[in-house]
Amino acid sequence: MASKMTSKHTIEARSKATAAPPDYEAAYRELVLAIEEGDPEALYALGTSQLHGIYLAIDQVAAVDHIRRAADQDYPPALFDLAVCFEKGVGLEESSSAAFELYVRAALAGDHQAFYEVGRCWYYGIGIAANQRLSEVWMEAFERRQNSNGDANHWAAVAGK
């Protein structure tokens, strides 16, 4: 379930895109090299750029293809975003059952927000028969994770990190 390590090309793409001034063409070339190495983070970065029109023209079909390829490697943000695409029918045919399955996979891969979305799906019967008790279980898990992350952030701030 663990993703590959981030490619040096993805790191370089991030550096070029956030430099002052940014060099988006060089960042894109680095992403392409990282994708050739199979880096899910690079696939996800390219897909989200295409999905939202950030630095690239909007192309929902190509975006979903890149995001799906990253999700196939269990990259948590890609699993989550692909679930959203299925739920809303963005770049592919709407499927609430596929969305639910991907939200569960994203949660199990460590995506915090996915816990909430799984609870919401159980509550409203999105992609699965409604079940209030299971909704509560997932919502409680979401809150526990939120509180533990908040505690970690609080203590990191206190420690000056």
Image: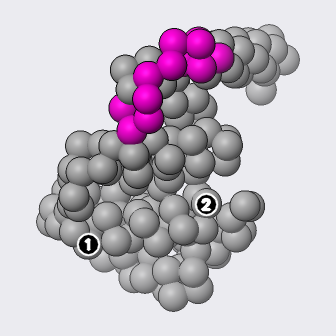
In the depicted structure, whether residue 39 falls above or below residue 71: below
The residue at 50%/47% (across/down) is 101
Say which element carries label 2.
Answer: loop
> Which of marks 1 and 2 precedes in the sequence?
1
List the residue tagged with mark 2: 74
Rendered location of residue 129, percent (x, y): 43, 29
Q: Amino acid at mark 1?
A: Ala
Q: Amino acid at mark 2?
A: Asp
**Splitting the image into 4 quarters, where does residue 8 fall?**
bottom right
**In this orientation, which residue lies closer to the viewer: 52 or 89?**
89
List the residue tagged with mark 1: 62
Q: Quadrant of the N terminus?
A: bottom right
Specify few, some or many for label 1: CA neighbours under 10 Å numbering under 14, 14-19, or 20 or more. Answer: some
Q: Start and end of the magenta stretch?
A: 126-137
Asked if the stretch drawn in magenta spans residue 42, the answer is no
The residue at 51%/88% (across/down) is 36
Say which element carries label 1.
Answer: helix
Rendered location of residue 18, percent (x, y): 43, 55
